[in-house]
Image: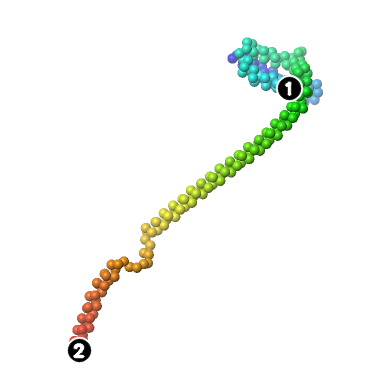
Amino acid sequence: MVSWIISRLVVLVFGTLYPAYYSYKAVKSKDIKEYVKWMMYWIIFALFTTAETFTDIFLCWFPFYYELKIAFVAWLLSPYTKGSSLLYRKFVHPTLSSKEKEIDDCLVQAKDRSYDALVHFGKRGLNVAATAAVMAASKGQGALSERLRSFSMQDLTTIRGDGTPAPSGPPPPGAGRASGKHGQPKMSRSASESAGSSGRC
């Protein structure tokens, strides 16, 4: 654990921050020699970082693994060994020069495929979002119409319960009989009065 922490600190400080500062000075001074030197270092360090991602998983059990990493970074940076320049000129530059066209073609194809995939998934995402929005709007509209319908039926029942004029229609069957019974005494009384007045005359 201690070896891992020390190696990470060494790689961070001497493998990243120190070269970054001197790369800044090379760009500022416009020294082509220093600029090329640090560009070669960054290419080698990028390859080292990529390989380190896998070796930390599979080779961390190896004795003195982290100490070897520290020694390798020091070898890359040392102005006496010039490890980064040596690796670049002997291995990286010849390999990249021979495979440059194939690498460029693969990058172009990957770029086109990634763009097509991005457009495809973007269209699918928009279609899914539009479908969800339409479904939500239709469900909301149906719920609103049901709510309004329930309100209208409730209002109608309330108005009828408060009292409205009875609907016009034929009178109930017992209404005629009741009026006939109450009308007969009145007619007999008027007939008796008329008979009495005629007798007096």
Q: Which residue carries the number 1 mark?
A: 43
Q: Disc 1 residue type?
A: Ile
The residue depicted at 75 percent of the width and 29 percent of the height is 104
Rate crowding at label 2 as few (under 14), some (14 to 19) or many (20 or more) other CA atoms within 10 Å. few
Which quadrant: the C terminus?
A: bottom left
Question: Quarter holding the N terminus?
Answer: top right
Front-most of residues 9 and 184? 184
User: Residue reaching furthest bottom?
Assistant: 201
**Residue at screen point 40% across, 58% down:** 159
Three-letter code, disc 2: Cys
**Crowding at mark 1 (Cα within 10 Å: few <14, some 14-19, many 20+):** some
Percent position (x, y) of residue 63?
63, 10
Q: Quadrant of residue 106?
A: top right
Please provide percent x and percent y for residue 72: 70, 14
For the residue pair 73 and 48, the one nearer the viewer reads as 48
Q: Is residue 9 visible?
A: no
Question: Percent from the top left, x then y, of residue 121?
Answer: 63, 37
Residue identifier under label 2: 201
Element marked by disc 2: loop
Whether residue 193 sits left or right of residue 173 in the image: it is left
